[in-house]
Amino acid sequence: MTDGAGTVTALLLAHREGVPGAFDRLVELIYPELRRVARSQLRRNARPDVLLDTTGLVHETYVKLVDQAQVGARDRGHFLAIAARAMRQVIVDHARNHQAAKRGGGAAHVPIDERDAAVQHQAEHVLLVNQALERLGKADPRLVQVVECRFFVGYTDAETSAALDVSTRTIERDWLRAKAWLREALDDRPADAAARTAGS
């Protein structure tokens, strides 16, 4: 099987039509790209191995996507954008679970070592950024899609344009608007969260 855009598109179509094994073949074909997106997500959201590692993130994303009856992606770029959103949701779920465990039983949580403190810090960062993106999504859902493509996947304006089926000029304007909105939304947040999210 060749690693071409046509093959990926054919597998996406086969998956939408319910062909057994199509999704697994698709994931196998673009697994290196999924790992690249996962590394980018972890670099942007949390240090690798603090909340989750690259392999774990890809595997949990697979479970999240395979459970959907239809992924709905048109092509490779669109699928990776959908995967990036699913990865961000997985990271947010891990951060929420950590915060819930930290508050468990009403007892004060005292970090026992540097790694424990790092996990707490990363979980807080992830949740702050997610809250900002959720607010942005209520104002303009496409801006969040642009952030996911440009910031989390690492797409260029042209690649984002193709993935979202919007003109490159519109993507350029949306990216500027999204960064400005997030800088303002995170202005009162910790400096590292604001810098890492809105500074790219």
Image (tube, rainbow, N blue to C red):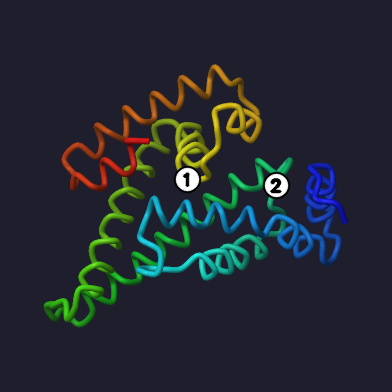
Q: Position of residue 11 (x, y in %)?
A: 82, 52
Q: Does residue 197 appear to the left or right of 116 in the view shown? A: right
- On the picture, is 160 further left or further right than 199? right
189 and 41: which one is in front?
Answer: 41
> Residue 31: percent from the left, percent from the top?
67, 59
- Kindly identify the residue that appears in the image at 79 percent across and 48 percent down: 8
Residue at the image point whose x is 36% and y is 61% from the top? 47
Q: Quadrant of the N terminus?
A: bottom right
Q: Which residue is mark 1?
A: 152
* Nearest to N terminus: mark 1 or mark 2: 2
119 up-or-down from 133: above or below: below
- Is label 1 in a helix, a strand or a loop? helix
Report crowding for label 1: few under 14, some 14 to 19, many 20 or more residues within 10 A (C-alpha). Answer: many
| Image disc number at residue 97 | none
Residue 151 lies, in percent from the top left, at 45, 40
Label 1 amino acid?
Answer: Phe
